[in-house]
């Protein structure tokens, strides 16, 4: 397949309410959309980097830089036989996983549309519905969190995840558990604790949480292994596992018993599928994480979560949990049973709402292949 052009578009979407984690608070999302063109077809992807280097070192600025200066020229230079060749061409460069993931996503959507198959089928998905979960940010008052937990339990969501940090943990989880003794509940610390907090974290064991996500540093595996030996609750790694090799090492070390797969964090589908296959072969459950994506990124997450190894509900929620209006039609909806349908149409299976995207666009950059740039009609 020869790419005729790659376009990057920054779109600002307000969140319905601020989202606060141990590393900061966010009121709107600057969405980085990737659009690829080939032979009259298009494919859409999303780069999930934030505006500041908080979750990871990547930012919207570094991602656009990497695509403009290095990745887009490498992909436009010559035709690509498939996703493997795209990944190996970008493997000449180090780092910038979210930027490369956005390109892998757009290309994979394009491939699926060119073949007329749903993205889920192209990736090897086997489910036609996936379980929704919700990730709830740190609130001003415990009662504000409990209201939100009540709401999403009432809407049928299959798992509630609560963001924690020192000072917003044991009491909060105790209250949540008292109100909902049986709901699948997990916590995510985004690296806010140290190994020295081991005795404190052990107090979480009594709440029979599904997991504790990323309790220690974003780049640590060894301390997590020691902490996992001290905890009954399963540790799930997010930030610490940026590729399939890191996942293998984490499993060999005993750093966790569950893996959060985010296509953005691991550099796209090539690594996400390798992690899925590895974990499936080792009996390790995986689930699909989220990065407050727009509908484009969310549609990709739904396709990924349809693979057989995704046995736990992920951070995939309805569009309206994030935005007053999403950029895809139809918007992602969660049924009364807490399930999301995997679309059956070609590619993402959702239409991008071009008029709304245009109205929310802050900037666009486009790079055409040398041939396309100079061809005459
Ligand atoms: O750690 O999983 C995380 C959002 C932004 C950055 C990191 C994380 C999150 C979430 C929200 O937990 C997941 C979502 O609903 O998209
Ligand atoms: Mg996380």
Image (cartoon, grey):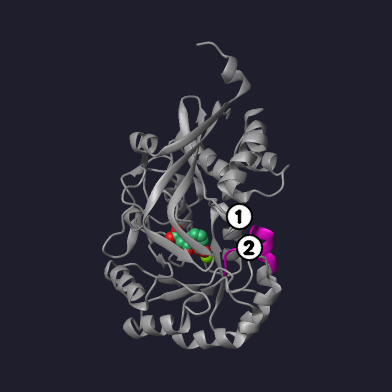
Q: Mark 1 highlights which residue?
A: 266
3D distance between C-alphas at marks 1 and 2: 8 Å
**Figure check: 206 above or below 249:** below
Would residue 309 be visible to someone looking at this image? no
Q: Element type at marker 2?
A: loop
Tell me, for residue 241, which label it has, or none. Answer: 2
Please indicate whether residue 243 sits to the left or right of residue 360 in the image.
Answer: right
- Is residue 299 covered in magenta? no
- Identified at 32% across, 83% down, the residue is 179
Horizontal arrangement in the rendering, residue 167 relative to residue 74 (left or right): left
Q: Quadrant of residue 250?
A: bottom right
* Residue 244 among those drawn in magenta: yes
Mark 1–mark 2 CB contact (< 8 Å): yes
| Residue 53 found in image quarter | bottom right
Crowdedness near tag 2: few (<14), some (14–19) or many (≥20) residues, C-alpha within 10 Å: many
**Residue located at (62% from left, 50% from top):** 97
Residue 64: x, y in percent?
Answer: 59, 40
Write the residue at 37% across / 78% down: 142
Residue range in magenta is 237-249
């Amino acid at each position: 397949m020869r790419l005729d052009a790659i376009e990057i578009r920054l779109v600002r979407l307000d969140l319905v309410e601020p989202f606060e984690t141990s590393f900061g608070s966010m009121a709107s999302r600057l969405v980085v959309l990737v659009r690829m063109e080939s032979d009259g077809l298009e494919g859409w992807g999303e780069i999930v980097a934030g505006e500041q280097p908080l979750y990871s070192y990547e930012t919207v600025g570094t991602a656009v830089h990497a695509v403009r200066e290095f990745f887009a020229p490498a992909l436009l230079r010559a035709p690509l036989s498939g996703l493997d060749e795209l990944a190996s061409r970008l493997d000449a460069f180090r780092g910038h996983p979210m930027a490369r993931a956005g390109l892998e996503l757009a290309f994979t959507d394009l491939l699926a549309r060119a073949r007329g198959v749903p993205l889920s089928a192209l990736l090897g998905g086997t489910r036609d519905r996936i379980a929704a979960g919700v990730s709830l940010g740190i609130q001003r008052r415990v009662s504000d969190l409990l209201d939100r937990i009540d709401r999403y339990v009432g809407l049928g969501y299959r798992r509630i995840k609560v963001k924690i940090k020192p000072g917003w943990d044991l009491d909060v989880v105790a209250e949540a558990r008292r109100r909902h003794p049986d709901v699948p509940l997990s916590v995510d610390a985004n690296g806010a604790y140290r190994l020295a907090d081991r005795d404190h974290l052990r107090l979480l064991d009594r709440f029979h949480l599904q997991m504790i996500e990323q309790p220690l540093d974003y780049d640590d595996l060894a301390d997590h292994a020691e902490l996992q030996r001290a905890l009954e609750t399963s540790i799930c790694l997010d930030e610490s596992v940026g590729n399939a090799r890191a996942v293998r090492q984490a499993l060999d070390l005993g750093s966790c018993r569950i893996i959060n797969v985010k296509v953005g964090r691991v550099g796209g589908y090539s690594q996400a599928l390798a992690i899925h296959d590895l974990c499936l072969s080792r009996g390790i459950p995986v689930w699909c994480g989220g990065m407050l994506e727009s509908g484009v990124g969310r549609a990709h997450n739904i396709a990924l979560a349809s693979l057989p190894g995704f046995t736990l509900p992920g951070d995939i929620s309805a569009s309206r949990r994030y935005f007053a209006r999403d950029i895809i039609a139809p918007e992602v909806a969660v049924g009364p049973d807490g399930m999301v349908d995997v679309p059956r149409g070609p590619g993402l299976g959702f239409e991008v709402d071009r008029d709304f995207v245009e109205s929310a666009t802050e900037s666009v950059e486009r790079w055409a292949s040398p041939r396309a740039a100079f061809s005459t009609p």
